[in-house]
Amino acid sequence: MIPEFRVGQGFDVHALVEGRPLILGGVHIPHTHGLHGHSDADALLHAITDAILGATGMGDIGRLFPDTDPCYQGADSRVLLRAAFDKVKAAGWKVVNVDATIHAQAPKIMPYAPAMVHHIAQDLAIAEDCVNVKGKTNEHLGFLGRKEGIAATVVVLLMR
Ligand SMILES: Nc1ccn([C@@H]2O[C@H](COP(=O)(O)O)[C@@H](O)[C@H]2O)c(=O)n1
Ligand SMILES: C[C@@]1(CO)OP(=O)(O)OP(=O)(O)OC[C@H]1O
């Protein structure tokens, strides 16, 4: 049997505000500001969720978990990622690899990347060396450079 491959891409951005925790890849990062959202606003996990749903033609995170539904208020995005992955898995797909970039002028992401990789690998049932998380500033340009928000971009490869 010849394996079938699909590529998926994901993007998410949330505003940085005072009085919220900063959670990325399921890791709480000590910082002056956190991400605003209906859920825990984990932009990295939202972009990964969109990438696996996109690769498999299953829509997007907002269609699966509407931000008008009070049951997702404050939701742990790892729970949402695992629920999306359950649907993807049920259609016979496995994740081959994930490559992600967090676009953040601050804080530094690299010290927390191994813990993020650990969570993502667990949630997608793959080895940690199949997951890569990078940090990138926006060279002080635009809203990301002014630290008004944090974005994440993701590419995934799936196989069945
Ligand atoms: N939020 C970030 C941004 C960057 N890094 C690390 O710094 C390196 C240089 O970033 P530039 O945007 O100046 O190219 C980058 O390769 C990352 O290793 C980071 O950890 N967190
Ligand atoms: C996750 C959901 C649902 O709580 O809300 P938010 O935390 O606002 O995040 P967003 O990236 O806008 O995506 C989808 C939502 O429906």
Image: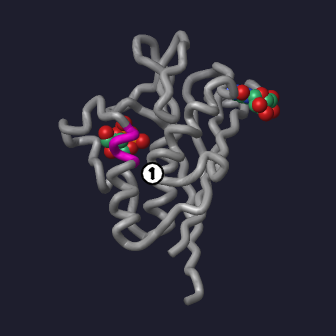
Q: What residue appears at the point 46 percent right and 69 percent down from the top-left corner?
A: 93
Residue 41 image point, x, y percent: 42, 32
Quarter where residue 90 is shown: bottom left
Specify few, some or many for label 1: CA neighbours under 10 Å numbering under 14, 14-19, or 20 or more.
many
Q: Is residue 160 above or below residue 42?
A: below
Q: What residue appears at the point 65 percent right and 40 percent down from the top-left corner?
A: 133
Residue 73 image point, x, y percent: 25, 32
Question: Dividing the image into four equal quarters, which quarter contains ligand 1?
Answer: top right
Rendering colour mode: one colour
* Furthest residue in direction left, as rendered: 70
Q: Is residue 124 above or below residue 30?
A: below
Residue 105 seen = no
Q: Is residue 77 left or right of residue 74?
A: right
The chief SS type of the magenta part is helix
Q: What residue appears at the point 60 percent right and 53 percent down from the top-left corner?
A: 98
Q: Is residue 127 above or below residue 148?
A: below
* Furthest residue in direction front, as rendered: 127
Q: What residue appears at the point 67 percent right and 23 percent down from the top-left corner?
A: 111
Pick whichever, 134 or 60, lies toward us: 134
Residue 157 image point, x, y percent: 60, 64
Residue 76 seen = yes
Q: Is residue 140 left or right of residue 92?
A: right
Per the image, the residue denoted by label 1 is 49
The amino acid type of the residue labelled 1 equals: Thr
Q: Is residue 66 left or right of residue 156?
A: left
Q: Is residue 122 left or right of residue 78?
A: right
What element does badge 1 sit on? helix
Residue 27 image point, x, y percent: 50, 27
Q: Is mark 1 within 8 Å of ligand 2?
A: no
Give the residues in magenta. 77-81
The question of residue 121 being in magenta is answered with no
Pick whichever, 118 or 41, lies toward us: 118
